[in-house]
Amino acid sequence: MDQKIVENVRNILKSQVDPVLEQHYGGAILTGIENGVAMVRLTGACASCPSAQDTIESVVKDILLPQIPELNDVILDTSVSEDLIDMAKKILNKEI
């Protein structure tokens, strides 16, 4: 995907989406773009919220799609972050 599109999405998430989600002690990060679909992970309190999918639909998608015509959709990335996997490995190996 075009690096300019990636940067535009990240900038919009930071400047327009995060202020909304910060009211609920959360945020959003772009984890990838494939075939015009942006994958967004919610952070903080929003990551474990039962309404996370609704937040993607009614906040993130509504803000991103009109501004980034190259995107066709925005989906919630529910994969486990590499940081969490690394931390779990360290705990299991008794490194921390």
Image (cartoon, rainbow, N blue to C red):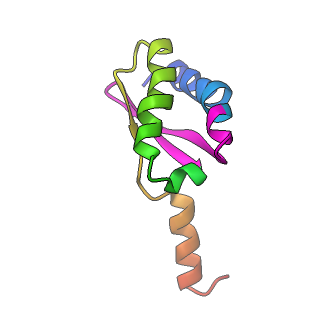
Residue 75: quarter of image: top left
Residue visible at 52% across and 26% down?
Answer: 6
Magenta highlight: main SS: strand
For the N terminus, the quadrant is top left
Q: What is the magenta range?
A: 20-43
Total number of numbered labels? 0
14 or 31, nearer to the observer: 14
Residue 95: horizontal and vertical position, in percent? 64, 83
Q: Please give left or right for residue 43 compared with residue 36 in the image.
A: right
For the C terminus, the quadrant is bottom right
Q: Does the magenta-highlighted stretch encompass residue 41?
A: yes
Residue visible at 46% across and 46% down?
Answer: 52
Residue 84: horizontal and vertical position, in percent? 54, 64
Q: Please give left or right for residue 79 compared with residue 5 in the image.
A: left
- Which residue occupies the extreme left position in the image? 35
47 or 51, nearer to the observer: 51
Residue 65: quarter of image: top left
Q: Does the magenta-highlighted stretch encompass residue 49?
A: no
Residue visible at 54% across and 19% down?
Answer: 4
Using the image, determine if residue 11 lies above or below residue 87.
above
- Which residue occupies the extreme bottom position in the image? 94
Using the image, determine if residue 62 lies above or below residue 38.
above
Residue visible at 51% across and 59% down?
Answer: 82
Residue 23: horizontal and vertical position, in percent? 68, 40
Residue 17: quarter of image: top right
Using the image, determine if residue 49 lies above or below residue 19.
below
Residue 86: horizontal and vertical position, in percent? 55, 68
Using the image, determine if residue 83 lies above or below residue 46.
below
Say whether residue 32 is visible.
no
Say whether residue 85 is visible.
yes
